[in-house]
Image (cartoon, rainbow, N blue to C red):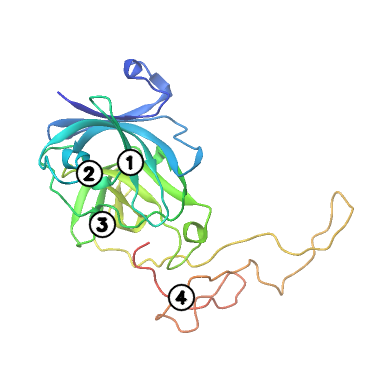
Amino acid sequence: MNCVRLFDNSIAHDESLSVGRRASWIQFRAGTFDLQVWFTPRGIHELATLNVDVPRFYCLLRKEFLYDGTAHHGEFVKVCVFGAASIYGRALGFHVLTENGAVIWRLPIHSLCHKEDAPVQPLDWLQFWDCFSYDISCTAFDRLANCRVRVRLRDGSSEGGQYMFTLDWYGGEDAEEAGDGGHKCAHVIALDNGNFAAQPNNRVQWFCPAFVTPWTEKPDYLTNTSVWKVERETETTDGFFYDDVVRASQPSQVGLYAKGLRVGGNATGAPESNGQPRPVMNPDTDH
């Protein structure tokens, strides 16, 4: 039986049965494949620009992407996905090694699948947002490693899947600000229909029988529009231990609202922790 595997670079093929406490793994049936996912406790923490290592996984590449979309539709090539590229304002690009020894760069996520009968779905259904920066990070979160998910696609339909790892961005306003146009991450998910997806938090419902009670109606949460800071002006002193200056009349934190006002709801805004009203902001429906 073919096997699609995902594991950290520190784990070699021949060590997959003897990693012990070095890694945890999950396995689920996906059509003609068993998808086996390996995670080390630390995940991947290196920050990168343009290119980033991802936990490698084996899957299928739609062969027409090797011919500029002109031929070989409906055919597949076995590949190992080992990296990703982030170009600001473009879709994610994945780097693959083919079974005959070619490295192909910057393939979109809809070029990949783990079942030959996976439906051909539009790229903007599978990845909701373009890259927010050239600076990107990849983390396989240990707490999410065993979670099943339900993904809400752009057409409003839902598809089950399995969490793989998370890509996130830094180094620019689009990547780091809160609010309407603020930061989003991309959870990479192996969908049950055979495709892969890269979706933000508000498009994914998580399942964990030991902790989560799944909602039956979508929560009415609002996107956070605040940016919190704790450092501000203070009196200087040469004392090693110094007395705090009483500032009860000043805001308890610096409120930055860089992404527009929220419309609707309480016209005066919700109170901040210092008792001052917060500006009414425009809800971000797709964060």
Residues at discs 3 and 2 in contact (Cβ within 8 Å): no
Residue pointed to by mark 4: 281
Q: Nearer the viewer, residue 22 or 287?
A: 287
Can residue 258 be seen at all in this image of the molecule? yes
Tell me residue 262's x, y (percent): 44, 76
Classify residue 122 as left or right of residue 186. Answer: left
Q: Callout 1, which amino acid?
A: Phe
Q: Callout 3, which amino acid?
A: Asp
* First in sequence: mark 3 vs mark 2: 2
Q: Callout 2, which amino acid?
A: Ser
Q: Callout 4, which amino acid?
A: Met
**Callout in the foreground (2, 4):** 2
Q: Is residue 187 above or below residue 59?
A: below
Classify residue 156 as left or right of residue 72. Answer: right
Q: Tell me what residue is drawn at x 44 percent, y 81 percent.
A: 266
What is the C-alpha distance between the residues marked 3 and 4?
Answer: 27 Å
Residue pointed to by mark 1: 94
What is the C-alpha distance between the residues marked 3 and 1?
Answer: 16 Å
Q: Residue furthest bottom?
A: 267
Q: Is residue 158 above or below residue 34?
A: below
Tell me residue 234's x, y (percent): 79, 63
* First in sequence: mark 1 vs mark 2: 1
Mark 1 Cα shell of 10 Å, populated few (<14), some (14-19), many (≥20): many
**Callout in the foreground (1, 4):** 1
* First in sequence: mark 3 vs mark 1: 1
User: Could you say which disc has been placed on residue 150 in the image?
Assistant: none
